[in-house]
Image (cartoon, rainbow, N blue to C red):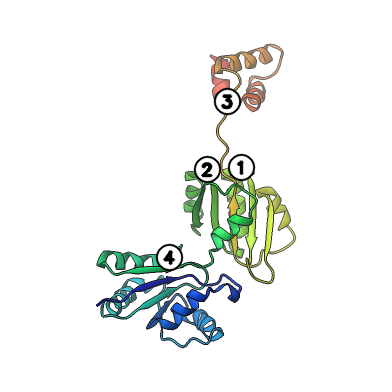
Amino acid sequence: MAGILYVVGTPIGNLSDLSPRAVQTLREVDFIAAEDTRVTQKLLNHFEIKKPLTSYYQHNLRQRGEEILARIAAGENCAIVTDAGMPCISDPGEDLVQLCAQQGIATIVIPGPSAAISALAVSGLSTSRFAFEGFLSTNRKNRMEHLRQIAQDPHTLIFYEAPHKLLDTLRDMLEILGDRRIALCRELTKIHEQVIRTTFSGALEWYADKSPRGEYVLIIEGAKPAQEPALSLEEAVAQVKALRQGGMPVSDAAKQVAKETGYKKGELYRRAME
C-alpha cells in the first residue's frame, strides 16, 4: 500500500509558530524532504525530532522527486518542507505534489505560516482580491515585461524580493506602475519585524540613506479603474485650437489639455494640426 505525502508549513521566523499538528506529523513520517537540510535540521533539533532528511531543491527536483515518489509508492510516508512558510508556493515542492497527483498518491496538507498572506493582512491595503506574483526576474527586460503585463490589474499585488534587488525593483515599479501605495513588510515574525506603509517614491526616499535588510514581501495597491474623460476628443481638440489662437504653441497647448483631460498629447496635437 502506498504511503502519503504530507505538505507541512514551517515557521517564517518565529519557531513558536510551528503548530502541534506539524510537530506530530514530522515525528511520525518515515522521512522528510527539505529545501535546505541544514535549515530544517535546526528546526528538528529545536523540537527534538530525529528523522532522516533528503535534500529536494530546484536543481535536483526531477531526479530526486522520482526517488521520493518511489519511496512513497513503496509504502513510506514523507513530509515535504521548505526553509520557511508553506511548501509549493514559489517553491520546487510544487513539482513533487504534481508527480503525486499524476500517480494517484495521497497528499495531505498541514497548514502553517505564509509570508505572503501574513504581509497582506497587515499591509493596510485591500485584501478582498489579490494576485500573488512571486519573485520578479533578475533580467531587467523580463522584469519590465512582467510589470507591464500586470500594470492594469486592479487586484492588490504581492511580490517577494531580496534586499540587494529591492531598490532596482522599486524604481522599475515606479516607472511602469506609477506612484502607487505599497507596504514593505520585512523580517515578519522575527525580532526586527517592520511594516513600512508608503508609496514607491516614498520608499525610495526612505532608503536614500540606509540599506535594505532582510527578506521583503511587497504588497502593492492595484490599478485604479480607468475613468472616462470629462470631455469628448472633439471638445479637447477645440480647447487646443483655442489656446493656439490665443498665442500658445500647439505643442504646449496639447500638453496642457492632455494633462487636464487624459487624452494623449500626440493625438491632440495631430488633430489640432489637421
Q: CA distance from mark 4 to mark 1?
A: 31 Å
Image location of residue 228, percent across then percent down? 56, 25
Residue beneath the point at 30% across and 68% down: 100
Q: Is residue 243 above or below residue 16?
A: above
Asked if the residues shown at circle 4 and circle 1 are in contact, with their CB atoms under 8 angstroms apart, the answer is no
The residue closer to the viewer here, 197 or 161, is: 197
Q: Residues within 10 Å of mark 3 (few under 14, many from 20)?
A: many
Q: Quick one: label 4 or label 2, which is nearer the N terminus?
A: 4
Left or right of residue 196: residue 121: left
Left or right of residue 104: residue 232: right
Asked if the residues shown at circle 3 and circle 4 are in contact, with their CB atoms under 8 angstroms apart, the answer is no
Q: Residues within 10 Å of mark 4 (few under 14, many from 20)?
A: some
Amino acid identity at mark 4: Cys
Q: Quick one: label 1 or label 2, which is nearer the N terminus?
A: 2
Q: Which residue is mark 3?
A: 263
Q: CA distance from mark 3 to mark 2?
A: 19 Å
Asked if the residues shown at circle 1 and circle 2 are in contact, with their CB atoms under 8 angstroms apart, the answer is no
Choose top left, top right, bottom left or bottom right for residue 178. top right
Q: Which residue is mark 1?
A: 178
Q: CA distance from mark 3 to mark 1?
A: 17 Å
Q: CA distance from mark 1 to mark 2?
A: 9 Å
The residue closer to the viewer here, 24 or 207, is: 24
Q: Which residue is mark 2?
A: 151
Q: CA distance from mark 4 to mark 2?
A: 26 Å
| Mark 4 or 1: the one toward you | 4
| Mark 4 or 2: the one toward you | 4
Amino acid identity at mark 2: Ala
